[in-house]
Image (spheres, helix red, strand yellow):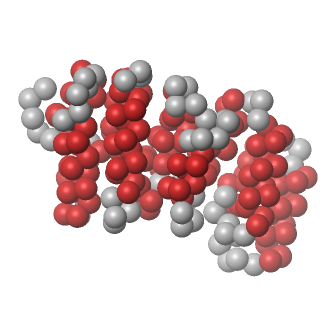
């Protein structure tokens, strides 16, 4: 599929449509999720329509989209937050979409413009209000900020400072932010 060959795309779509089980279909969908063609949208819609009542399978569907290397992935993730399959109050959905984006999509999470960092900080602050444990878990994407180039360090540090300055910050989130910045918790 990386070759962007019509014959290979046809074979992949055939595997997707004729798969006898979810694992085989998901394998084909994983390659189609990174294919910038109409086949991608078709396969994602068909997979969701077939498996929409299986929560764990829908989590995989969310994660595949969150980890895509295609341009515009952050916009797709933001759009999926409004999808009927997503609920920020459901920890599995938050991990599947937001966690996958921030921890398994380094290309887009670490975008030079800092948009991935801003997105994650916003979600952490949202989650802090009603599920501080998940918010704290998502903080791990920021904890190694010193290992990146100066521009990305600055972007992550700014978001850590923003989180730390938030009113009514839970002890869980506060501790990780403070330790990440080398402060006493």
Q: Is residue 112 visible?
A: yes
At 23% from the left edge and 42% from the top edge, which residue is drawn? 162
Q: Residue most toward the left?
A: 184
Whole-percent x and y of residue 46?
Answer: 82, 49
Looking at the picture, does residue 51 appear above or below residue 18? above
Looking at the picture, does residue 57 appear above or below residue 61? above
Looking at the picture, does residue 37 appear above or below residue 89? below
Q: Is residue 110 visible?
A: no
At 23% from the left edge and 64% from the top edge, which residue is drawn? 151
Whole-percent x and y of residue 18?
Answer: 91, 52
At 19% from the left edge and 42% from the top edge, which residue is drawn? 161
Residue 182 vs residue 11: left or right?
left
Residue 131 lies in what quarter of the image? top left
Residue 178 lies in what quarter of the image? top left
Which quadrant does the N terminus fall into?
bottom right
Whole-percent x and y of residue 149?
Answer: 23, 64
Looking at the picture, does residue 61 appear above or below residue 125? below
At 22% from the left edge and 56% from the top edge, which residue is drawn? 153
Whole-percent x and y of residue 119?
Answer: 40, 48
Which quadrant does the C terminus fall into?
top left
Residue 134 vs residue 12: left or right?
left
């Amino acid at each position: 599929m990386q070759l962007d060959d019509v014959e290979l795309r046809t074979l992949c779509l055939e595997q997707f449509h004729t798969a006898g089980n979810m694992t085989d279909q998901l394998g084909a969908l994983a390659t189609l999720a990174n294919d910038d063609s109409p086949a991608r949208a078709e396969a994602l819609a068909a997979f969701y329509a077939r498996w929409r009542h299986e929560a764990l399978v829908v989590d995989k569907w969310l994660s595949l989209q969150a980890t895509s290397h295609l341009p515009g992935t952050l916009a797709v993730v933001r759009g999926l937050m409004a999808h009927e399959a997503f609920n920020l109050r459901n920890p599995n959905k938050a991990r599947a979409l937001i966690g996958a984006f921030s921890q398994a999509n380094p290309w887009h999470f670490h975008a030079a413009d800092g948009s991935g960092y801003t997105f994650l900080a916003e979600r952490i602050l949202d989650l802090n209000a009603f599920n501080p444990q998940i918010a704290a878990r998502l903080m791990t994407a920021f904890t190694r900020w010193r290992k990146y180039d100066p521009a990305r360090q600055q972007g992550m540090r700014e978001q850590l400072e923003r989180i730390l300055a938030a009113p009514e910050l839970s002890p869980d989130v506060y501790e990780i932010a403070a330790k990440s910045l080398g402060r006493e918790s």
